[in-house]
Each structure stands twice: as C-alpha cells, then as structure tokens.
Amino acid sequence: MIKRLFVLFPSLLVIAVVSMGCASHKAYVLARRDGSYSPSPASKIAIVNNLKPRPEDQTLCVALMAELKQQGFRIVSQEEAEFTLSYWIEDNWHERKVPVRTYDSPGYDPRFSPGPMPSSQLYAGGTPPGAIAYQSPTAGRVTETMVDDPVAVQGIRLKLHSRDSARAGRLETAWEGYIDGGFKVVPEREPILLRTLLTYFGKDYTGRARLVK
C-alpha cells in the first residue's frame, strides 16, 4: 500500500512568515458606505464602548479618541448624536499559498522478483554465507503542489450606525471600515492604522492603501 506524507517546506515557510511580519508601507483597507447616508467628520458622532472590553479594546479606544480629535471629528453625547461609532480589534484568517511535497513510499519494481536472490547473483563478499539478500526497492516518487494555508491575522474595524434607525428599532450601518494589521495589532501601530482607515471615512474603497504617517 502506498502511503502519502505531506510536508511543508520549512525554509519557505519561514520566509513567508518573515515577509508577512515585516513592517510594510501599505495595508489592506475595506470601506463601505450606505448610499442613503453621507457621514463626514462634521457629523455629530457618539462613541459606543464595549460592554465587556478586552485590554486591547481599551488601548484601541484611547488611540481612536486621540485620532478623532486630531482629525477634527465632532464627538458628542448619545443624546445629541446623528451616528454612533463602534470599534474593535477583529480576528481573521488570511489564506496564503505554500508549497507541499507529497512522498510516495518506495515500492518494488514488478519486473523483479520480491523473493531472495540466487547466491550466484550475490556480490562477491557482499553477503555472508547463510544470509538472504532481497532486491533493492525503487526510489519513491516526489510531487510538489501549492496548497492553501490559513494564517491568523488581526485588524481594526470601525462601524458607524444611524442614530435615527436605532431609535426606530432597526440598526442600519451608514459606513464601516476595516484595516488589516498583520499577525497582531500592537498598540504602537494603532495610531497609524486608525489614521489611515479614517482617511476613507464616509467613502467606498477596497484595496491596499499607503499608510498615513
């Protein structure tokens, strides 16, 4: 029976990990706006905090408030707001292609007998008297394929809801944005990620965007 063993190339896997972990001047951004709304930094916006914030959400809140103030957003109380803005660090999966080798276990060439070799065919001095020698197996086959390999990543998501729709008992998303933060969103990178994402506030955009220093 043929056994197959799937092995990732260790060296290439390390290279892929290093390349994804390196600092980049761009990040993937997804921004979508409901055509029924036209939110802008001048709109009255209230921040919605998580009921049970994680430590990373708390640090994100501090960075978000600082960035909103820096960019001149109009932050008000819930009673005055036209929109509510929620935020969180989101866990996602990124699919990448990695090379895989498939090894077929060695087998015997059917043209040869799998039984013992006659003593007349033994190598001179190669096998002691009374020992049994068998035909050497053929080399196993190796094939290479590219497979999907899921990698855990994180990003920042902002979601803007219409306050009027919430009062009417239906929650409508006026705008939402997401920016990829790599393997992990660390506090040191939050300001630049938020600054870049807020560039697309109230707009539609999908693709890689240059980080705003």
Image: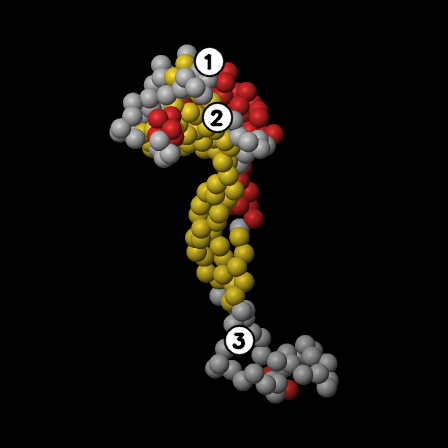
Q: Position of residue 27 (x, y in %)?
A: 43, 30
The residue at which mark 1 appears reads as: 69
Q: Look at discs 3 and 2 and give the one toward the viewer.
A: 2
Instruction: Identify the residue at horizontal 66%, vertical 79% (top origin).
Output: 124
> Which amino acid type corresponds to the residue marked 1 in the rendered image?
Lys
Q: Secondary structure at mark 2?
A: strand
Mark nearer the N terminus (1 vs 2): 2
How many other residues sit within 10 Å of disc 1, few (<14), some (14-19) or many (≥20)? few
Q: Can residue 81 be seen?
A: yes
Given contact means CB atoms under 8 Å apart, are the residues at marks 1 and 3 in contact? no
The residue at which mark 2 appears reads as: 48
> Where 70 sits versus 173, above or below?
above
> Where 43 sits versus 130, above or below?
above
Disc on res. 1: 3
Q: Position of residue 163 (x, y in %)?
A: 38, 25
Instruction: Identify the residue at horizontal 53%, vertical 51% (top origin).
Output: 9
Distance (Cα) linking label 1 and label 3: 68 Å
> Which amino acid type corresponds to the residue marked 2 in the rendered image?
Val
Q: Secondary structure at mark 1?
A: helix
Q: Position of residue 23 (x, y in %)?
A: 50, 28
